[in-house]
Image (tube, helix red, strand yellow):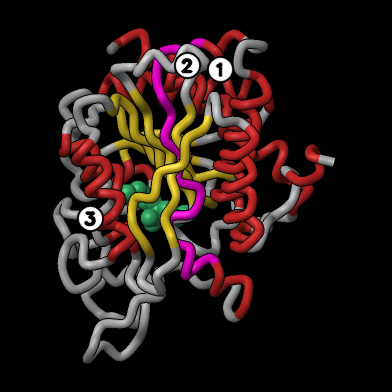
Amino acid sequence: SSVLYYERYHPLEDIYHWINKTTHDHPEMVEVILIGSSFEKRPLFVLKLSGKGRSQSKRAMWIDCGIHAREWISPAFCIWFVHYAITYYSKVPDITEILDSMDVYVLPVMNPDGYKYTWTTNRMWRKNRSWHPGNYCPGTDLNRNFDANWCTEGSSSRACDETYCGLFPESEPESEAVANFLRSHKQTLKLYLSIHSYSQMLLFPFSCTYQEASNHDELNELAQEAAQNIRRYYRNNYRYGAGAKTIYLAPGGSDDWAYNLGIKYSFTFELQDRGRYGFLLPPEFIPKACKEALTGLKTIALGVIKKT
Ligand SMILES: NCCCCC[C@@H](C[SeH])C(=O)O
Ligand SMILES: [Zn+2]
Ligand SMILES: [Zn+2]
């Protein structure tokens, strides 16, 4: 049954099949967009969710999942969210208001090569699987490859390190594809979300510097409200704050870059758990982790709709 489908992790081929089936089964709400391909030439598909009015909304939001291969709860959430949106649109008020106000672009697996690799070879792989001539190891950390204080403290210039920044900003086909899409949609995009795990945090710019964002108080208020709602409904604690001081210095990140592009509401979610299972979160935890992430997403999206 479909409920079970959304409470387990899926191998890459399964996710591509699901993307095709979902687009085919719900043409009135779902459109698939090919935004580029990975180093190993796998397609990067974005699902565009629109309210049935398909009023060519002037506003949109973006959610990417699976930047880091081992964070399996992240793609699981994007898939779960698309199913939730399709199932409850026009039935539940808040998701209906979101989709009637903004189109939602969802990239379920931003790093398909790495994700595949965690299923076949190394469950703890983080980076993509690109190979640059002369480098001693494969893989760039896609969340250190964007043009935001690129390759400064908090990332590494050594190819074998987990936070290797790449040859230059957007040196990777995956980050280049996302940056190109965001650049070409920057007039309509009002909210950027990047889904990761683990440590239960709601983070916002900047992570690439200790400097505060110009709308720091607004971002902090949205994150605080989201964390409060997660606590209220699910009795679980999420920390929140600017990335640099809440988690660690992390330059070259997609959220900081999107913020500097002009998407002034930009967040990175670190989902469950706090470290007991870490990246190996058992499938039984998928529903609760996704409901918590949904509550955070709804709180922030509804807040952004009121402001923009
Ligand atoms: N853009 C940096 C946000 C803060 C760090 C996020 C984590 C997710 Se695993 C990281 O990329 O190390
Ligand atoms: Zn991550
Ligand atoms: Zn993380």
Q: Amino acid at mark 2?
A: Ile
Please, what secondary structure does the residue beneath circle 2 have?
helix
210 vs 195, nearest the viewer = 195
Q: Which mark is residue 98?
A: 2
Q: Residue at x 39, y 13 (%)?
A: 55
The magenta region covers: 97-115
Marks 3 and 2, the one that precedes in the sequence: 2
Give the labeled residue for mark 3.
146
73 vs 230, nearest the viewer = 73
Q: Give yes or no for residue 105 being in the magenta stretch.
A: yes
Of tags 1 and 3, the one toward the viewer is 1
Please, what secondary structure does the residue beneath circle 1 have?
helix
Give the labeled residue for mark 1.
95
> Which of the image's four quarters has the C terminus?
top left
Marks 1 and 3, the one that precedes in the sequence: 1
Give the distance between the C-alpha atoms of the residues marked 3 and 2, in whole angstroms. Answer: 28 Å
16 vs 145, nearest the viewer = 16
Q: Amino acid at mark 1?
A: Ile
Please, what secondary structure does the residue beneath circle 3 have?
loop
